[in-house]
Amino acid sequence: MADIRRFPALRPVKEEAIGTGSLSYEEVIERYQSGRMFQNHFGEFFVYEVKDGDKVYNGIYACASVDDYLKGVIRNHSWAKDQVTEDRLSRLERDKIQTDPVILTYHKQPYITVIMNEAKWRAPAYHFITPDDVEHTIWELYDYSKAKLLIDAMYGTSDLYIAAGHDIAAASVAHCQDMRAADRNYDPSVEFNYFMCVLLEYEAITEDGVVTVPRFQPNIFSHVI
């Protein structure tokens, strides 16, 4: 049973979404302090559509549980090893912010597709085309009842699978374990117990056993932990 939740994303104002690129922690903070980025503290899901040539991909930006990773609900490639790079972990320990998502897949659930499509009835939060001719459209899923339905649907999923970002997940888990070790009475609901992810339907990105990860805009969202 997969535990996902909304997260208080730090994100750019609409006019600057296309120029986000790969930002350092210092750049994220500078943009936030100058009003070029903002945060909704109550937390949201985001439906993210990528049109790349004749391919269309739909994902959900969310937060996944470290405990699911530790329990094996979130699975790795059989050939992949959880190697925490010192650079990534030290940056996470220092900055307390995640700027890259872990790409997670789930097996097809038509009801989740319905929820994503209903989110698209509203005007998008972001819409832009990057210089590589990839079209990006992002909708907020902030309706509590719809968010609850999505959480319940994902809770009925027996496993999630890491398609990309193994090192990001491993660093997030290591950081969480360090935080827990430092405080045995830690609050399990605080943000360091979760890491930012994009949920994608496995069948939609896999063809003949080959997984294609959509080209999401780097650092469009950040997760403060």
Image (cartoon, grey):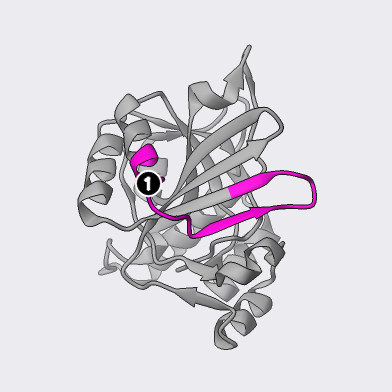
Asked if residue 1 shows in the view, the reply is no
Q: Please name the residue shown 69% across and 71% down the image.
A: 24
Secondary structure category for the residue under label 1: loop
Closer-to-camera residue (65/223): 223
Q: Give percent across and percent down for residue 22.
A: 71, 62
On screen, residue 148 versus residue 116, left or right, reads: left
On screen, residue 175 versus residue 112, left or right, reads: right
Please say if 102 is above or below 190.
above
Please say if 1 is above or below 169.
above
Q: Give percent across and percent down for residue 38.
A: 49, 76
Quadrant including the N terminus? top left
Q: Give percent across and percent down for residue 14.
A: 57, 68
Closer-to-camera residue (28/182): 28
Quadrant assignment, res 77: top right
Q: Give percent across and percent down for residue 164.
A: 61, 39
Which residue appears farthest toward the right when viewing the image?
131
Closer-to-camera residue (94/107): 107
Query: On the image, numbered disc 1 is attached to which residue?
Result: 121
Asked if residue 169 shows in the view, the reply is yes
Is residue 120 located in the magenta-colored stretch of the structure? yes
Is residue 118 located in the magenta-colored stretch of the structure? yes
On screen, residue 90 versus residue 58, left or right, reads: right
On screen, residue 102 versus residue 139, left or right, reads: right
Total number of numbered discs in the rendering: 1
Which amino acid type is shown beneath numbered disc 1? Trp
**Residue bounds of the magenta highlight:** 116-136
Which residue appears farthest toward the bottom when viewing the image?
34
Quadrant including the C terminus? bottom left
